[in-house]
């Protein structure tokens, strides 16, 4: 049973929108006006996984949809809700993690994120695994407008799966939106990259830096940019207290594809 079918079971009136094209090739005009869009998708990789991430291309390359130096609007709070739910329900042997921002669409003007099941046919075809992603999305939709309030931060550094940032977030009072992979910061002007993602990351309260996930010279440039922007820098393994409050969104959508009912793209 697909993510879509299971989501309909969990929330019969869920506003699910089916699209004919690959999700990474969507444009802003393809997405209806809403306060949140969640993309149900598959992830191709080496390890069984449940992941969440925002879409876009922070650097000079756009290998999988979108355009360079452009990212979509992030959704830190509901993305954390989805990740925590999937972590609680995850099947044995699965990693549950944030991914860095790395593919299209890049021009969405509404908050959005991808919730994904990875990483191959042996995981994609199991209804119990699809159920975990559906539950993560359903938890976001059920509580639309009543999520806990966490401090939104921008993630920087580390590898594709951002393990240090994931660990930090889940033990702290922050919620990460965009995460820029360390290699993107090293291969581009860090200041330009940071400014690109800051514009699409809401009220960013701090930069969350994977301290060892960026080379020393580039790390210093990041610290200099943070100082000029007046943003504190958090180290990825530092622990903080949790806090709770309310954040308001009004309408939430879940996106799937009619071409691939369970998943929508590979990379």
Image: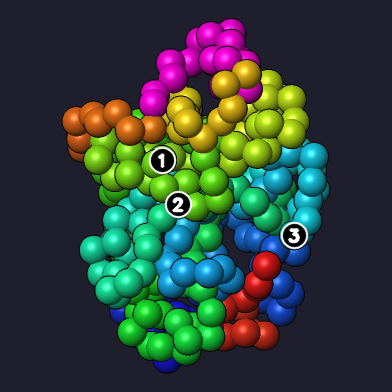
Marks 1 and 3, how far apart at CA: 24 Å
The majority secondary structure of the magenta stretch comes to: helix
Q: Return the residue nearer the eye: 101 or 110.
A: 101
Q: Quadrant of the N terminus?
A: bottom left
Position above or below: 109 against 136: above
Q: Return the residue nearer the eye: 62 or 94.
A: 94
- Whether residue 160 sits left or right of residue 19 in the image: it is left
Q: Point out the frontmost of discs 1 and 3.
A: 1
In the image, which disc is placed on residue 165?
1
SS assignment at label 2: strand
Binning the other alpha carbons within 10 Å of mark 3 as few (below 14), some (14 to 19) or many (20 upward) gives: some
Colour scheme employed for the rendering of this structure = rainbow
Marks 3 and 2, how far apart at CA: 18 Å
Q: Return the residue nearer the eye: 127 or 49.
A: 49
What residue is shown at x 36% (from left), y 69% (from top)? 94
Earlier sequence position, callout 3 versus callout 2: 3
Binning the other alpha carbons within 10 Å of mark 1 as few (below 14), some (14 to 19) or many (20 upward) gives: many
What residue is shown at x 47% (from left), y 69% (from top)? 47
Determine contact: label 2, label 1, CB under 8 Å: yes
Earlier sequence position, callout 1 versus callout 3: 3
Q: Which of the 4 quarters of the picture holds residue 256?
A: bottom right
Residue range corresponding to the magenta coloring: 218-235
SS assignment at label 1: helix
Residue 77: x %, y % from top left = 38, 45
Q: Return the residue nearer the eye: 253 or 58.
A: 58
Q: Which of the 4 quarters of the picture holds residue 42?
A: bottom right
Q: Quadrant of the C terminus?
A: bottom right
Q: Is residue 58 magenta?
A: no
In the image, which disc is placed on residue 64?
3
């Amino acid at each position: 049973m697909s993510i879509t079918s299971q989501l309909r079971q969990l929330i019969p009136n869920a506003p699910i929108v089916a699209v004919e094209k690959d999700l990474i090739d969507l444009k802003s005009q393809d997405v209806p006006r809403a306060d949140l869009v969640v993309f149900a998708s598959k992830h191709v990789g080496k390890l069984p996984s449940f992941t969440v991430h925002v879409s876009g291309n922070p650097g000079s390359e756009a290998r999988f949809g979108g355009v360079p130096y452009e990212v979509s609007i992030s959704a830190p709070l509901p993305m954390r809700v989805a990740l925590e739910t999937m972590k609680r329900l995850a099947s044995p042997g699965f990693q549950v993690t944030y991914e860095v921002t790395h593919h299209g669409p890049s021009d969405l003007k509404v908050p959005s994120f991808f919730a994904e099941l990875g990483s191959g046919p042996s995981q994609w075809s199991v209804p119990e695994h699809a159920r975990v992603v559906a539950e993560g999305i359903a938890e976001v939709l059920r509580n639309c407008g009543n999520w806990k309030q966490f401090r939104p931060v921008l993630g920087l550094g580390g590898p594709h799966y951002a393990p240090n940032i994931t660990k930090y977030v889940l033990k702290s009072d922050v919620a990460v939106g965009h995460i820029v992979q360390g290699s993107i910061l090293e291969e581009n002007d860090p200041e330009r990259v940071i400014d690109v993602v800051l514009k699409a990351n809401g009220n960013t309260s701090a930069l969350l830096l994977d301290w060892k996930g960026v080379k020393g010279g580039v790390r210093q440039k990041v610290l200099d940019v943070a100082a000029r922007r007046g943003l504190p820098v958090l180290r990825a393994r530092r622990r903080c207290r949790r806090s709770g409050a309310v954040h308001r969104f009004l309408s939430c959508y879940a996106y799937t594809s009619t071409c691939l009912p369970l998943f929508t793209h590979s990379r």
